[in-house]
Image: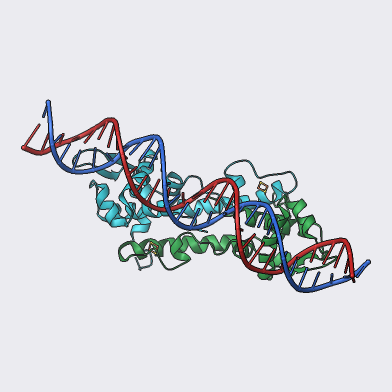
Chain colours: A cyan, B green, C red, D blue
DNA sequence: TAAAAGAGGACTAAAATAGTCCTATAACAG
DNA sequence: CTGTTATAGGACTATTTTAGTCCTCTTTTA
């Protein structure tokens, strides 16, 4: 099982690419598709979601493309994942309030709850800028 | 996206049920199916994997069923998930070594690596016994 | 030795993921 | 004011994963 699906992977690659090719340049989809290895038509859909989430902005027409709407420092991995894939949860019952019948219900749920929170925190702690700089190297 | 799929959910429910109905009793599949709400034929497959992983032991024939092979204190959520669903990863490249072309490859991977480890640690920290006792209540 | 129980493989159904295609709309250059 | 370049967005399809069923076989013990 992978937490990050293809669409989010593409999104992260695109954002990292944009963060590397510094500043406020506008990046046409074609460039992003080439840079990420994603099919352009598919990447479009992904970027549309990032746009809807306010992570990037897009412009149509000649000279159009994609640019950051938020500072890449402030874009967390969690918000990218949620924008592109939808909610992240350790178990179904943390997304919709189903799957719970009286007996097991809240023992498992309440104890997994801690893990759920920690998981989200983990994803919230990493930003696009983090991903774009190799943190393995000494500062 | 849910980290824990139905099969693992059933497995955890069954294990929690066994841990609650204390000691070394042998639990027939029918009982576990009723207790978990899982279709019995499906639960069988799940239990077989727990068996293969050495988490539980099974006995055939009259009076047969399922019992713990490991102390429920020592059974981590991670090992249940891995036994039933297979490997857990934040991204595909942490399972198989694909999906990586030179450019993005290791920046993203190396930085997500930390999250990957933390995630596994999180799942390793919780045991079946933990799940069976409501940790919200004061000690 | 028959009934009760799990083993295991082949199969099917449903849902999520990944991707395509086609038409429309926006921006700008000439 | 029109053609070209670009994204928007919906409908569609293909592939893969998840979930579940079914049937036959073996083990165990009353
Ligand atoms: S809320 Fe999911 S098993 Fe109880
Ligand atoms: S290893 Fe997965 S994107 Fe580089």
The relative height of residue C26 versus residue B28 in the rendered view (above or below) is above
What residue do we see at 35% from left, 68% from top? A137
Give x and y (percent) for residue B100: 37, 64
- In the image, ligand 2 is in what quadrant? bottom left
Give x and y (percent) for residue B30: 79, 56
Residue A126 seen from this side: no
The relative height of residue B90 versus residue D5 in the rendered view (above or below) is below
- Specify whether A6 is left or right of B47: left
Residue B72 seen from this side: yes
Give x and y (percent) for residue A105: 70, 46
Give x and y (percent) for residue B32: 76, 56
The relative height of residue A14 versus residue C3 in the rendered view (above or below) is above
Name the foreground residue: B117 vs B25: B25
> How many numbered markers are drawn?
0
Residue A130: quarter of image: bottom left
- Specify whether A20 is left or right of D14: left
Name the foreground residue: B99 vs D4: D4
Residue B70: quarter of image: bottom right
What residue do we see at 38% from left, 67% from top? A136
What residue do we see at 35% from left, 48% from top? A42
- Specify whether B114 is left or right of D24: left
């Amino acid at each position: 099982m992978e937490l990050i699906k293809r669409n989010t992977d593409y999104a992260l690659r695109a954002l990292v690419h944009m963060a590397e090719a510094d500043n406020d340049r506008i990046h046409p989809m074609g460039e992003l598709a080439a840079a990420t290895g994603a099919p352009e038509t598919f990447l479009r859909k992904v970027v549309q979601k990032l746009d809807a989430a306010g992570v990037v902005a897009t412009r149509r027409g000649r000279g159009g493309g994609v640019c950051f709407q938020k500072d890449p420092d402030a874009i967390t991995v969690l918000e990218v994942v949620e924008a592109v894939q939808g909610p992240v949860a350790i178990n179904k019952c943390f997304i919709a309030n189903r799957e719970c019948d009286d007996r097991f219900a809240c023992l498992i749920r309440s104890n997994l709850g801690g893990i759920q929170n920690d998981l989200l925190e983990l994803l919230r702690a990493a930003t696009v800028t983090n991903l774009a700089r190799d943190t393995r190297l000494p500062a």
